[in-house]
Amino acid sequence: MKRLLPVAAALAALVFASPANAYWEYGHQTVAEIAWANITPKARREITRLLRQQKLLGTPQCKAGTIDDAAIWADCIKGIKDENGKQKFGYTSAWHYQDVDICSPFDVDSVCKNGDCVSAQIVRDVKLLKDRRTPTKQRLEALVFLIHFVGDLHQPLHAGEKGDKGGNDVKAEYGTYAASRLNLHSIWDGYLAERAISTGPSLVRRYSLAQRKRIAAGNVLDWSRESWAVARDVTYKTAIGGDPCGPTPTKVRLDNETIASLVPTVRLEVERGGLRLAKLLNQAIG
């Protein structure tokens, strides 16, 4: 498992976190490592074979030669500019999330026009990986996107929100840390995720067959609904201190007691992401 981000880098990432940077590096790589520990040998061989051809991606600035690198490639490419100074991969931005309203009945279709949402892209990537007639470059892209997007789906603020850009518009304090640009989304992406992953036994291990079947049960739509419910019933409820659909204060505060209470939920979300990614990889190439 990766070390925690150095303090300076963590602070910078926290302050400038965007909706597409779910879990920072630590969370995405942990999801990928859980999956790697729970896929079949055949899936490992095929992943290794595809990642060896990372040059086909045409992104030397963003490595994808290992499962850890692949886990953060989709975020890394956001910084690549074309000859006109525009984001070369800007069209992928909407693929990292789906802003389903937590205060209305669950309806992912309404926010997923033309497949521009994280759940639709996960389904698309699995389909491309399964089809051996898909050109190698496209299969490789599908692989690295899939590894990242399953992690994104299990960050609740990428699955549900209440008209606040997934919590990015909600100013927040985290324990004793109260940076002026800290928000609810960046807390769940960063410090809370790192606190949870590093608390207790390592999440990266071989899970029993019974655990894998139980945690990875269902499909992408089921997982989307579940993550959306976590956003409503845990993320917003604890932040607001009551009705998640009630008025959001100008600034919310997660005190140390609240942070400690959220650790089990965040650990479970990372665990779910890893084992469900393993299930999809096994189905596609394992």
Image: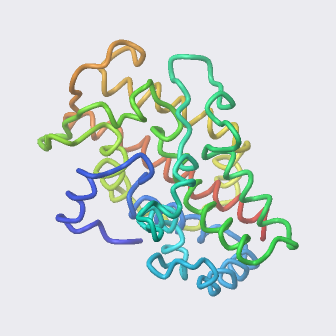
Q: Residue at x 27, y 52 (%)?
A: 16
Q: Is residue 60 above or below residue 232?
A: below
Q: Indicate the quadrant where residue 239 lies.
A: top left
Q: Is residue 69 left or right of residue 147?
A: left
Q: Is residue 184 left or right of residue 22?
A: left
Q: Nearer the viewer, residue 182 or 82?
A: 82
Task: Report the colour scheme.
Answer: rainbow
User: The C terminus appears in which quarter of the rendering?
Assistant: bottom right
Answer left or right for 190 relative to 90. Answer: left
Q: Residue at x 54, y 71 (%)?
A: 70
Residue located 75% across and 78% down the image: 136
Location of residue 104 in the rendering, given as x and y in whole percent from the top left corner: 56, 16
Q: Quadrant of the N terminus?
A: bottom left
From the viewer's perspective, tell me whether residue 71 is left or right of residue 210.
left
Q: How many marks?
A: 0
User: Does 106 appear above or below 22?
Assistant: above
Q: Look at the picture and state if 135 lies above or below 222.
A: below
Q: Nearer the viewer, residue 39 or 135?
A: 135
Give the vertical position of 80 relative to 200 (above or below): below
* Quarter occupied by residue 47: bottom right
Q: Position of residue 270 (x, y in %)?
A: 49, 52
Residue 44: image location, x then y, percent: 68, 78
x, y percentage for residue 112? 65, 36
Quarter assignment of residue 281? bottom right
